[in-house]
Amino acid sequence: MQNDIPQDYMVIGTAAEGMVRAFAARTTNLVDEARRRHGTYPTATAALGRVLTAGGLLSANLKGDDLLTLRFMGNGPLGAIICSVDTRGYLRGYVQNPEVHLPGRGNKLDVGGAVGKNGFIYVSRDIGLKEPYTGSYPLVSGEIGEDLAAYFAKSEQIPTAVSLGVLVEPDGSVQAAGGFFIQVMPGADVEITARLEGILDSVLPVSNMIAAGRVPEEILNDLFGTMHFNQLETRPLAFRCRCSKELLESILISLGADELSDMIEKQGSAEVKCHFCAETYQFDKSELEKLLAEAKNVSGE
Ligand code: ZN
C-alpha cells in the first residue's frame, strides 16, 4: 500500500439504541483499480463502482468461507455488471461492456440509462451448500442504489436506505467513491423511521462527503447526530481477484485433449484473460503440451 493513499474500508455499527444498523464504506482505491484494470469509460466506472461498493457493504453479513455475488442484468448498453466478495473484504468485478459513456444532465453521469430499467438484480450467497442461495428482484431505475433498496424491501423484507456514489474526474480517474446502508430493525417504532427519513432527505451525496475528506465513521456520526452512532467494527476492503495461473491451467485441462491439441496446432500458444480482474495469463507451447498430457490422463487416453 502506498503511503499517500489511505486504504479502503468499511465501518459497521448501530444507532438509536440498536434499533438501526448502519454500514458505511470508502471505496475510492478499489473502484479506481477496477477502472484501470478494465479500462472503463466514466459512466461504466460509476456503474461498476456503485456495484463494487454495494458488494463491499453486503460482505458485512458474510461468515467463514461465504462468498457473495451481486449481479445487475439490465437492458442498457453496459450489459451485465458482476461483483463477487468474500469475508476478507476482497472484491472483484467487471462490466460486460466497459467502453460506455452516457453523460447525463449537468455533471451527472446517466448510470440508470447505461444500466437500463428493464432487468433484474440477483444476490447470491454461497455458504457452502450444494447450490448458492439466490434472491432476485426487478430493477426499478438502473441507478443501482434504488434497485438495491427495492430488493432489500421486497425480497428480504428489510427496509434499507441505500446511498452509493462515485465521482469521476475529467481525466476519467476516480476522485471519490463510497456508500452507506442504513437498516431499520423489525420492531423499531415509527418515530425512529420518521426521524431517519428526515435526516436522509437532507443528507449530501455520499461521494461528495468522501471527496471532502470525510471518513466512513464521520459520515455515520454526522448523519445520526443525536440518534448516536455506535461503532462496532471496521473491516478493510480491497480489489483482489482469486484467479491464478494454476486455476487457469485446470480450466484449460477441462477443455479436453481435442481442444488443447487444436490450440497447439493452430496457435502454438494461448493467452487467457480473467473476466473479473482482466489479468492475462500466457501459456507457451511446452506448457500447453504439458496440459494436453494431463488432459489425456484425466480422460484415460
Ligand atoms: Zn482474476
Image (cartoon, rainbow, N blue to C red):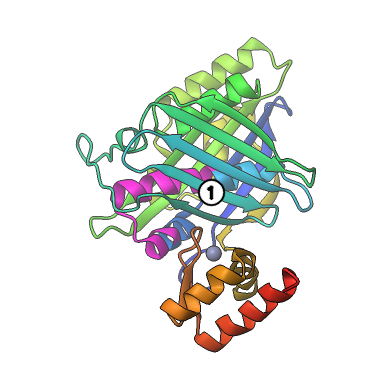
Kindly tell me whether residue 231 is visible in this rendering.
no
Quarter location, residue 24: top right
Compared across the picture, whether 278 is left or right of 107 comes to right
Against 190, is 138 above or below? below
Residue at label 1?
83
Q: Which residue is drawn at the image coordinates 35% and 50% (left, top)?
A: 97
Tell me which segment is drawn in magenta: 34-54
Q: Residue furthest top?
A: 190
Q: Which residue is drawn at the image coordinates 79% and 47% (left, top)?
A: 128
Nearest the camera: 121 or 88?
A: 121
Q: Under tag 1, what secondary structure?
A: strand
Compared across the picture, whether 201 is left or right of 226 comes to left
**Magenta stretch secondary structure, dominant:** helix
- Circle 1 packing at 10 Å, graded few (<14), some (14-19), many (20+), is many
Kindly tell me whether residue 139 is visible in this rendering.
yes
Against 220, is 155 above or below? above
Compared across the picture, whether 146 is left or right of 292 comes to left
Number of marks in the image?
1
* Percent position of residue 194, x then y: 56, 14
- Check if residue 36 falls in the magenta segment: yes
* Percent position of residue 193, x then y: 59, 17
Q: Which residue is drawn at the image coordinates 43% and 23% (left, top)?
A: 140
Amino acid type at circle 1 is Cys
- Check if residue 149 falls in the magenta segment: no
